[in-house]
Image (cartoon, grey):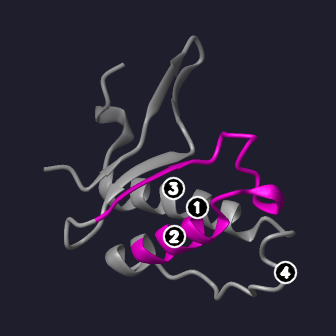
Amino acid sequence: MFKAVIPLIITQEGLLFDNSILYLDEKNRTLILMDMGSNKYSCPNCPVYVECVYGLKRIVSDVNISIKELDEENARNLRIPSKLWTKVVFTLLQKNLRNFNSLIV
C-alpha cells in the first residue's frame, strides 16, 4: 500500500515534481490531499485552512520532519502553511528518492 503520492509532470524540458501530495497517515485512518498549485486555496482566504494545518502537522509527525512552530496569529497572512507544505513535499522526495537518474521518463 502507498504511503505518499507526489504527482509528476512531464514537459519538453524534463520531469517536474508537482507541489502536491496524497498521503495516508500512519494508522491508515486519514487520507490527506494537498494541492498547493490551487489559487482557490491560497492561505489568506482558504476555506479549509484549519484542515490544511491539521494535515500538515499529521504528516510532519508521521515522517519525522522538523518544521518551525506555526505562529497562528500571523501564519495565515504570511502563507506559512503553503511554504511548509513545499518543504514537506521536497523533504519526502529527498528522503525516498535516492537516485533521480533512475527515473524513466
Residue labelled with disc 3: 90
Q: Position of residue 86 (x, y in %)?
A: 60, 57
Q: Residue 21: percent from the left, percent from the top?
A: 45, 49
> In the structure shown, which secondary structural element does the residue marked by tag 4 occupy?
loop
Q: Earlier in the sequence, mark 3 or mark 1?
A: 1
Image: 8 above or below 37: above
Q: CA distance from mark 4 to mark 1?
A: 17 Å
Mark 3 is on which residue type?
Answer: Phe
User: Disc 2, disc 1: CB below 8 Å?
Assistant: yes
* Amino acid found under the numbered disc labelled 1: Trp
> Are there few (<14), some (14-19), or many (20+) residues within 10 Å of tag 4?
few
x and y percent of residue 72 in the render? Answer: 74, 85
Q: Circle 3 — which element?
A: helix
As displayed, is residue 70 above or below residue 13? below
Q: Is residue 94 left or right of residue 41?
A: left
Residue kind at label 4, given as amino acid type: Asn
Between the residue at mark 4 and the residue at mark 3, the CA separation in whole angstroms equals 24 Å
8 vs 51, left or right, is left
Q: Which residue is mark 1?
A: 85
What is the C-alpha distance between the residues marked 3 and 1? 9 Å
Query: Where's residue 68, x and y in %?
Result: 63, 85
- For label 2, the residue is 56
Which mark's residue is nearer the viewer, 3 or 2?
2
Q: Magenta region: which residues?
A: 30-58
Q: Quadrant of residue 50?
A: bottom right
Nearest-to-viewer mark from 4 and 1: 4
Q: Does residue 38 appear left or right of residue 58 in this picture? A: right
Mark seen at residue 74: 4
Find the distance from the CA under tag 2 to the CA under tag 1: 7 Å
